[in-house]
Amino acid sequence: MSETPEVPVTSATTNDAPAFGWSGYAERVNGRFAMVGFVAILVVEALSGETFLRWAGFVG
């Protein structure tokens, strides 16, 4: 029969256990996604020559 894979006790990059909610691991992942989003906005502004708000249609 097939064995079920073991759930990792800690993350590959930290000693924190992956968890949902207000944990250090969740906050670290959230911060990394925020950094990626911020860089993506900078790239959009650099390539389009307009501010992100104008490019997204929030400002006329």
Image: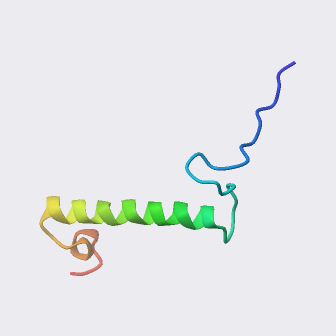
Dividing the picture into quarters, in which one does residue 33 lie? bottom left
Residue at 77% x, 37% y is: 6
Instruction: Find the residue positioned furthest to the left.
Output: 49
**Against 17, is 6 above or below?**
above
Q: Quadrant of residue 22?
A: bottom right
Task: Give the image location of residue 12, x and y in percent.
Answer: 59, 45
Position of 41 with respect to 31 (left or right) is: left
Image position, residue 47 (x, y; %): 15, 58
Front-most of residues 13 and 35? 13
Above or below, 5 against 8 in this view is above
Quadrant of the snapshot with the C terminus? bottom left
The figure's colour scheme reads rainbow
Q: Residue at x 19, y 66 (%)?
A: 45
Residue drawn at the location 25% of the way across and 71% of the way down: 52
> Is residue 41 shown above or below 59?
above
Counting labels gives: 0
Placement of the N terminus among the 4 image quadrants: top right
Residue that appears at 73% across and 47% down: 9
Q: In the rendering, at what x and y percent does residue 46 appear?
A: 16, 62
